[in-house]
């Protein structure tokens, strides 16, 4: 079986507050997949011709109105997941 691969960038923002490191999450709203769940600070699918880094920057600005530069990003992992059917998500 061939899978359709969708690349997505997931951004987790960290901040230091009162000597503690906090991970800033976003609660999914509406009636979308995963509504009500706490997830990445921002996330989204990579557009054709777009790098993972540029996707992360764009999605963070679109979703939570936070702007940062390419050198502010720390790459952490790649995730491959098969959630059934002919859809195979591929997260960076």
Image (cartoon, helix red, strand yellow):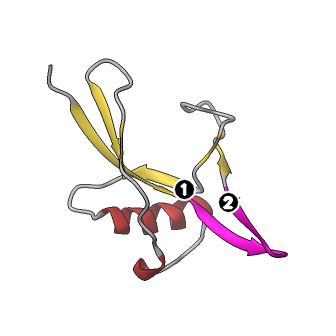
> Would you identify the image quadrant in which residue 34 lies?
top right
Quarter of the image with the N terminus is top left
Foreground label between 2 and 1:
2
Residue lying at 33% horizontally and 62% vertically, measured from the top left = 52
Q: Which comes before the other along the chain, label 2 or label 1?
A: 2
Which residue reaches farthest right?
18
Find out whether residue 60 is within the magenta segment: no
61 or 26, nearer to the observer:
26
Prevailing SS of the magenta stretch: strand
- Label 1 SS: strand
Horizontal arrangement in the rendering, residue 81 relative to residue 23 (left or right): left
Task: Determine which quarter of the picture holds residue 23.
Answer: bottom right
Q: Which mark is residue 23?
A: 2
Q: Position of residue 88 (x, y in %)?
A: 29, 31
Residue that protrudes farthest toward the front in the picture = 19
Q: Is residue 64 above or below residue 39?
A: below
Give how far across and how far down residue 69 sits, in percent: 45, 81
Residue occupying the point 20% across, 61% down: 49
Residue at the image position 63 percent from the left and 33 percent from the top? 35
Tell me which residue sits at (48%, 79%) in the image: 72
Q: Is residue 7 above or below residue 24?
A: above
Q: Position of residue 53 (x, y in %)?
A: 36, 67
Which numbered disc covers residue 26?
A: none
Residue furthest left in the image: 2
The local crowd at label 2, few if under 14, some if 14 to 19, many if 20 or more residues have their Cα within 10 Å, is: few
Where are the magenta residues, as a range?
12-24
Residue of label 1: 42
């Amino acid at each position: 079986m061939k899978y359709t691969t969708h690349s997505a960038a997931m951004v987790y923002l960290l901040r230091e507050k009162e000597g503690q490191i906090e991970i800033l999450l976003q609660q999914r709203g509406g009636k979308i997949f995963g509504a009500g769940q706490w997830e990445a600070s921002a996330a989204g699918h990579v557009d054709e011709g777009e790098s993972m880094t540029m996707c992360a920057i764009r999605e963070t600005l679109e979703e939570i109105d936070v702007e940062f530069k390419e050198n502010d990003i720390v790459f952490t992992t790649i995730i491959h997941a098969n959630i059934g059917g002919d859809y195979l998500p591929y997260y960076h």
